[in-house]
Amino acid sequence: MVNAAATTNDERRVKDRPAAEHAPSLGVANLNPFGDLHTLQHLSARLARSFRGVFEPVLRRNLRTWAEPLVVQRFADYSAERDGRLTAWLPMAMTPGDCRALAVFDGGFVIETLDLFFGGFGERPKTLPTEFSPAAEAMIVRLGQMIAGPLGNAWEPLARVAFAPAGPEASPAMLQGIDGDDAMIVTRFGIAASEDAPAFIDLVYPVAALKPFAPTLTGKVLGRSAAPEPKWRAGLTRAAMNVKFPVRSVLAEPTIPLAQLMDMKVGDVIPVSFGADVPVMVGNDRLGTGTVGTSNGKAAIRITSLHRLDEEEDQ
């Protein structure tokens, strides 16, 4: 893990796995209906870069972060690879929609971050417990909240998806809505400090959850820049410039007692007075001030000064 001594220079998966491309064959179910997953791999690379800013304040060390190649496999095969080790399985709701991804944390990593959170040195017991304490479960949810924002930002060029953690589980058998035969896309992220052995965080997407995004997943690889298309931006600007706002001026706002108001009758006069400049309003905001006069035979107001909203906020 992050604070353990390095035993090998290989920071990749211990067990070789097939790549994320699956050629259909007779009698074998095709786990990956999307073909190559270069777009999702590019998304994972974007997310890996943002993980440094997420975990460096928690682990209090300079980190290296990276994304490993994607893997598509049955959920039963994936969970069996954990070999019964203490693992945090955190469902991550994906909205809009009712789909869920999974954030999977090694139990030792959770205990280390919990110890650091309470001012320790990131130590863990020689023998891990068989279940998480309430404080550890709260830390798991906190870790999910920390990665939810960067995860949504990484997805933004592909689709506007928001992620939110639910209640963690210590056993994959307790996860609702996931069957052992379900096809899963496993994205793994490595986190390492200096020469220490890395920690790994998995984000697991059910293939069924990503089917609504199939057109974009099978499209071209996303570029580094997600700048809007110029023609679309120009059209949006023209449309915004044609939006109409009501402009009004308040000449006077006299006040009178309630008793006088109740005694008023037709023909009574309410005196008003105003200075040389009157306020000019757009909605509930003050645009500026002006002088009352006439133009082309109609009442009009000449703008004498404009009011800046940012100046008001600075005061």
Image (cartoon, helix red, strand yellow):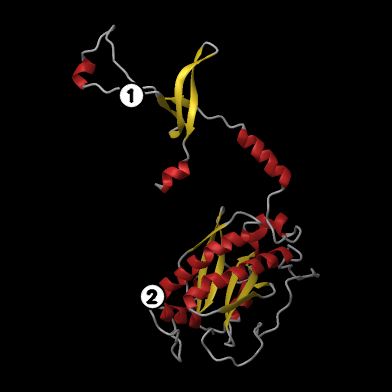
Is 34 on the left or on the right of 257, as rendered?
right
The correct choice, above or below, for 209 with respect to 10 in the image is above
Could you say where residue 315 lies in the image, as x and y percent from the top left?
39, 46
Could you say where residue 93 lies in the image, as x and y percent from the top left?
53, 60
Which quadrant of the figure has residue 199?
A: bottom right
Is 94 on the left or on the right of 281, as rendered?
right
Label 2, residues with CA under 10 Å away: few <14, some 14-19, many ≥20? few
Label 1, residues with CA under 10 Å away: few <14, some 14-19, many ≥20? few
Q: Are marks 1 and 2 in contact (CB under 8 Å)?
A: no
Q: Which residue is at the front of the view, 37 or 290? A: 290
**In the image, farthest residue toward the top:** 267
Q: CA distance from mark 1 to mark 2?
A: 60 Å
Mark closer to the observer (1, 2):
1
The correct choice, above or below, for 125 with respect to 189 in the image is below
Could you say where residue 295 lies in the image, as x and y percent from the top left?
53, 15
Could you say where residue 163 lies in the image, as x and y percent from the top left?
54, 60
Q: Which residue is at the front of the view, 178 or 217? A: 217
The correct choice, above or below, for 270 with respect to 207 in the image is above
Q: Residue at x 71, y 56 (%)?
A: 216
Numbered mark located on residue 135 in the image: 2
Q: Residue at x 46, y 78 (%)?
A: 113
Numbered mark located on residue 253 in the image: 1
Q: Is residue 271 visible?
A: yes
Q: Is residue 184 visible?
A: no
Labels 1 and 2: the sequence-earlier one: 2
Q: Residue at x 48, y 32 (%)?
A: 305
In what quadrant of the picture does the N terminus appear? bottom right
Is label 1 in a helix, a strand or a loop? loop
Three-letter code, disc 2: Ala
